Amino acid sequence: MEATRTLALSSSPAAARRGPEKAAVYSVHFRHLSTTSSLHLRAAQSPVLRARSSPFQGWRRRRRAGGLVVRAEMFGQLTTGLESAWNKLRGVDVLTKENIAEPMRDIRRALLEADVSLPVVRRFIESVSEKAVGTDVIRGVSPDQQLVKVVNDELVQLMGGEVSDLVFAKSGPTVILLAGLQGVGKTTVCAKLASYLKKMGKSCMLVAADVYRPAAIDQLTILGKKVGVPVYSEGTDTKPSQIAKNGLKEAKSQKTDVIIVDTAGRLQVDKAMMNELKEVKRAVNPTEVLLVVDAMTGQEAAGLVSSFNDEIGITGAILTKLDGDSRGGAALSVKEVSGKPIKFVGQGERIEDLEPFYPDRMAQRILGMGDVLSFVEKAQEVMRQEDAEELQKKILSAKFNFNDFLKQTQMIAKMGSFSRLIGMIPGMNKVTPAQIREAEKNLKFMESMINVMTPEERERPELLAESRERRKRVAKDSGKTEQQVGQLVAQLFQMRARMQKMMGAMQGKDSPDMNELMESMKAEEQAAAGTGGRRRKYGNLRQRQLDAMRGFRRR
Ligand SMILES: Nc1nc2c(ncn2[C@@H]2O[C@H](COP(=O)(O)OP(=O)(O)OP(=O)(O)O)[C@@H](O)[C@H]2O)c(=O)[nH]1
């Protein structure tokens, strides 16, 4: 029986400008893909369109029908599975441990069906549940959208977070050794990679070290010609390690940037294969050892990357035939199972069907919800802005307290090193790493005192300014001196005054001397280190701090 599915269509802006139906380009998200499924496509301006597709014909395969170009997405099965999780959250106000239980079960099922390995699924579910329940409610963002965002971020992390670039040798040719089981697409990858590197402006040479299948050498020679790179071969009578060594020598003499060594594929991992690879590796000392794995083998591919890494030590994986994989288990498991990144993905038989593996783009493809993700990100941005406005109000009304102080310092820590932050402020001098370490140490120092304050004291620093007993208690509980606590309190009032001055300037009420402001900030930072010499040097600062406190007491 033929399965029929209703699919959402989205038209590209350029296509929309060209007119609704004629040459419109629609990106179709195949919610469910099976070799025989008939797909009903429904769109606001388009006629119902029937298309047939096979997952093995390439996800980018375009089908023209009635002027429409239809593009099938990979991982359709996983996307559908995840969708039911979001649907279960319709109508809830906030994500709780209880109401995410069922959606999490759906996500777990979808991942297992996608052939993601069980320990990976367990860790993923645990992490998503924890983060989903802990997320702040964002105005205008529904809990299901919020869960989509958490799942997206975790998927990106699961796949390695960042794109893992190829590493090139500092001097001499970069050697890329390709390994893999038979038929995974190794020889094709050699040519695809050479073509990719050529486009990067690197000169390449292919080395035919698969001596067991004579046709492999011919295949590589033909592919080499096709992409316009030389192929080094010595037939089938020389040892692969010797061929690789000689190939490298040849590349050096020709000043070639990169050599790609094609090795023999076997039907399974066996000792002889591993030993031979180890020998080739020893002979050419490769910069990259990449294991080519077939995406359609799911979590088995991840296991293979792991065992190759244990045996010979690899630097990453290349996942081929992603175009035929509607499940996604391999892409999701490789990094987590083996600790090695996927560096490239092959998604078609053509030379140009190889691209770097981008975990974020892949996560978006899986979820198929790019618009929801950018919406949530924008809403988060608005929330941050509202936070900032709230802070601004507090500053202007002189209510900036230790909670805000802590929030600010933690935010700075989250934003990365101090240096980048300071570097962003125009007019600020470059800071040295030692100064950065010093500033970060100071933050920790101050935090330890704030952490032992009562909620009331954090809210109203005046309590500490007025009571020596309180300052003494904070000093004792944090293991600091009374004087250091006094300094911190004075610093907060100074900060208040300075921020008010700054805000006033920004709002055109006042025109502070920026140099004076910078000077005072610098002096204050150094004074916080608290050495005797510094205290003498910045004696006038201490005086200013006392003045600030006195000024407060007078109020
Ligand atoms: N759909 C699809 N087919 C691919 C991809 N990469 C390779 N193939 C096909 O997979 C088949 C095997 O590719 P080869 O490059 O010969 O594989 P191999 O690993 O070198 O094989 P051995 O030399 O026998 O070990 C060929 O028909 C390729 O066209 C891909 O990303 N997508």
Image (cartoon, helix red, strand yellow):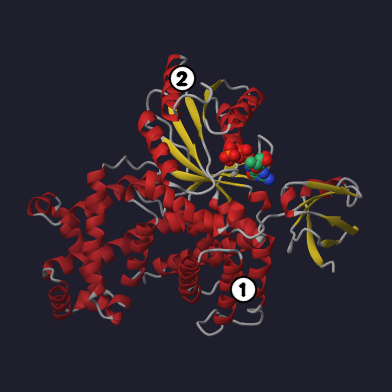
Q: Is residue 101 left or right of residue 445?
A: right
Query: Image quadrant for the C terminus?
Result: bottom left
**Helix, strand, or loop for circle 2?**
helix
Label 1 Cα neighbours within 10 Å, binned few <14 / some 14-19 / many ≥20: many
Which of 460/361 is in front?
361
x, y percent for residue 226: 67, 25
Residue visible at 22% across and 51% down?
438
- Decide if residue 59 is in sight here: yes
x, y percent for residue 475: 14, 73
- Kind of residue at badge 1: Asp
Which of 143/219 is in front?
219
Within the image, what quadrant is residue 445 found in?
bottom left
Residue 241, which numbered label?
none
Extreme-bottom residue of the structure: 98
Marks 1, 2: nearer the viewer: 2
Extreme-left residue of the structure: 532
* Residue located beneath label 2 in the image: 251
Give above or below for 453 relative to 12: below
Residue visible at 43% across and 23% down?
248
* Residue located beneath label 1 in the image: 144
Give above or below for 334 relative to 550: above
**Helix, strand, or loop for circle 1?**
helix
Q: Is residue 231 left or right of residue 269?
A: right
x, y percent for residue 281: 39, 34
Which of 435/200 is in front?
200
Which of 167/152 is in front?
167
x, y percent for residue 351: 66, 34
Give above or below for 229 relative to 70: above
Question: Along the polypeptide, which appears first: circle 1 or circle 2?
Answer: 1
